[in-house]
Amino acid sequence: MDSSDLYRDITDFAHSTPGWAQSAMELWTTAGLLLFGVLYVAVWWRSRDRAPRQVALAVLAPLATAFAYVVSELVKSAVEEERPCRAVVGAAASLVACPEYGDWSFPSNHSAIAGAAALSLVMAARRLALFVVPMALLMAFSRVFVGVHYPHDVAIGLLLGGSVAPLVVLALTGPVNRVIRTMRRSGNRAAAWFAGPGPARPAR
């Protein structure tokens, strides 16, 4: 894959934008990950008063995202694609420091995490789709905008994360659902705090 021309176009565009837009994109590449983390916690907290399956989906969202990240990192280590901020001749300078040699480009881990987080959160709370999907797309674009990834890096990263995470959630929802039910019936306060009382709470 060679998306060098598109990379040049996007980085040229990035340099033509106002300083505040550049700063916002630089911030978003990290802040987006933190916002996904906040959403994990919020979705889990709200699920505690609902059916055990909802808690299972909420708990699995960050775990599935972590698994997708590991898969992305394994692919990255196998492919060893150089970063475009070093490899593309005639491209505008990256807006952020080019990662060190050995921190490979393909696929984009940020994009894989964003795709995985968006899809796993949608599985746990569908109403979030209109919020988290644009979040993920913007995060992927921001990695090209600041100059540290090729467009194909982020496209494949999104597809990888958005494919792996849902498969993990689907595979583990049943077993985790049973664990949540057991925790709710245990009478243990710590378990009830984590899994929530919900409809499975024993009558007193």
Image: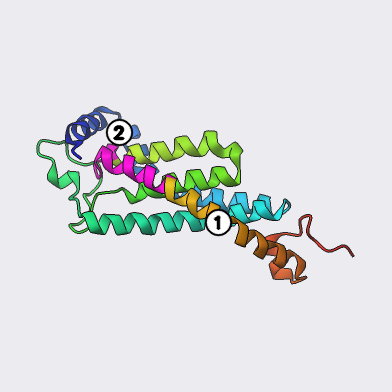
Image-based side of 192 in relation to 145, left or right: right
Can residue 23 be seen?
Answer: no
In which quadrant is the N terminus drawn? top left
Q: Residue at x 70, y 63 (%)?
A: 193
Q: Residues under labels 2 and 1: Cα distance?
A: 39 Å
Image-based side of 96 in relation to 201, left or right: left
Say the numbered circle drawn on residue 60: 1
Picture layout, residue 2 above or below residue 81: above
Q: Residue at x 76, y 67 (%)?
A: 185
Q: Is residue 41 or residue 115 the one in the foreground?
A: 115
Q: Residue at x 18, y 44 (%)?
A: 84
In percent of width and height, residue 5 lies at 17, 32
In percent of width and height, residue 177 lies at 65, 59
Picture layout, residue 94 above or below residue 195: above
Q: Main secondary structure of the magenta part?
A: helix
Residue 141 sits inside the magenta stretch: no
Q: Is residue 45 or residue 186 the one in the foreground?
A: 186
Secondary structure found at label 2: helix
Q: Earlier in the sequence, mark 2 or mark 1?
A: 2
Q: Residue at x 56, y 58 (%)?
A: 172
In percent of width and height, residue 74 lies at 31, 59
Q: What residue would you read off at disc 2?
A: 19
Q: Which class describes the residues within 10 Å of circle 1: few (<14), some (14-19), or many (20+)?
A: many
Secondary structure found at label 1: helix
Image-based side of 89 in relation to 121, left or right: left
Say the numbered circle drawn on residue 10: none
Q: Which class describes the residues within 10 Å of circle 2: few (<14), some (14-19), or many (20+)?
A: few
Q: Which quadrant of the view contains residue 29?
A: top left
Going by the numbered disc 1, the residue's amino acid type is Leu
Going by the numbered disc 2, the residue's amino acid type is Gly
In percent of width and height, residue 19 lies at 30, 33
What range is drawn magenta here? 144-162
